[in-house]
Amino acid sequence: YGIFSLISSANEECLFLNVYIPINNKTSQNKKAILMWIHGGSGQIGTGNLFDGTILAALGDIIVVTFNFRLNLFGFLSSGDERLLGNIGLYDQSMVLDWIYENSEALGGDIERITVGGHSAGAPHAYYLAISPFNQGRIRRLILQSGSPFNIWSHIQANQAMERFDVVADDNQCGMMDGFDEKLNCLRETNYHFIAEYEHHTYTSAYHTNVVLHGDYMNKFQLGLNSTDTLADTEMLIGSNDDEVDSYILKAIEILHQKVMKMTRQ
């Protein structure tokens, strides 16, 4: 697929999926295995459109599904408690799995052979999808590339989520509001394009939003204690991608160049 793009077009109307089906599927009586692929990007950037499943579907004789899900503040902003649970991006991924189940017969797919895979942040997201109580028993195989659910960058604790919410509110002129509900309403009324521009500048920040270990979709118990039993019948392939850091090096060079030019002008 080449270098992973850190820059992609963004839109609030993002919930689309792409389905790649072998041509012979119309005449074949055999149901095809299904691969659901989750893109990376730290849960902040990216799109399913970066991955063309045409060749994989044709040569592997499988059905490939790539998709978008809500990212950054729109997908993972949270208070760390019931007021704003967060993990909306993970719920979007569950909806894709629901869609695959509901439409597998029309697609010629075999729901007993569903593999969910992902790279970078998509890898832990695939794992979270498998151990969530909403999806247990649905996923036959997992592919985790260059990412683990136990990496420190793959999730945050509930108290960290509230800290990051406060930073986001302050940075978007909502911090002066009294009370959490007022701050949240202020953020909801903020122009989408302003929020999107803010997200672009927080991608490399320690305060960007992330999966929160809280709530009914994902919590500490599921990740730390129960995942082994939940995945006892799930086959898993773990590896890493070559030269994945290249895209970040290019972005770092761009940022460094901008800072040097700014210092030169000053």
Image: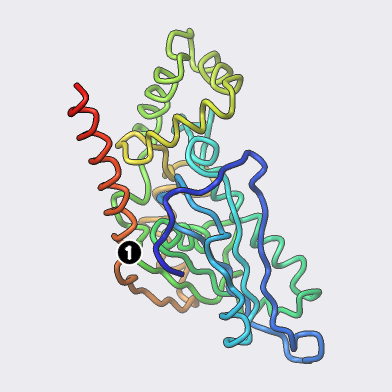
Residue 262 spot, x, y in % from top left: 24, 28
Estimate how packed mark 1 is, as few (under 14), some (14 to 19) or many (20 or more) residues with alpha carbons within 10 Å.
some
In the rendered image, which quarter contains the C terminus?
Answer: top left
Q: Secondary structure at mark 1?
A: loop
Instruction: Name the residue tied to disc 1.
Output: 244
Residue extending furthest toward the front: 265
In the image, 83 versus 108, the foreground residue is: 108
Residue 156 spot, x, y in % from top left: 36, 42
Residue, x 55% and y 74% (percent of image)? 115
In the image, 128 versus 241, the foreground residue is: 241
Residue 144 spot, x, y in % from top left: 41, 69
Q: Quadrant of residue 61?
A: bottom right
Left or right of 71: which side holds 138? Answer: right
Q: Of the residues shown, which amino acid type is indicated by label 1?
A: Glu
Residue 45 higher or lower than 32, as above or below: above
Q: Quadrant of residue 56?
A: bottom right
Residue, x 24% and y 40% (percent of image)? 257
Residue, x 48% and y 40% (percent of image)? 72
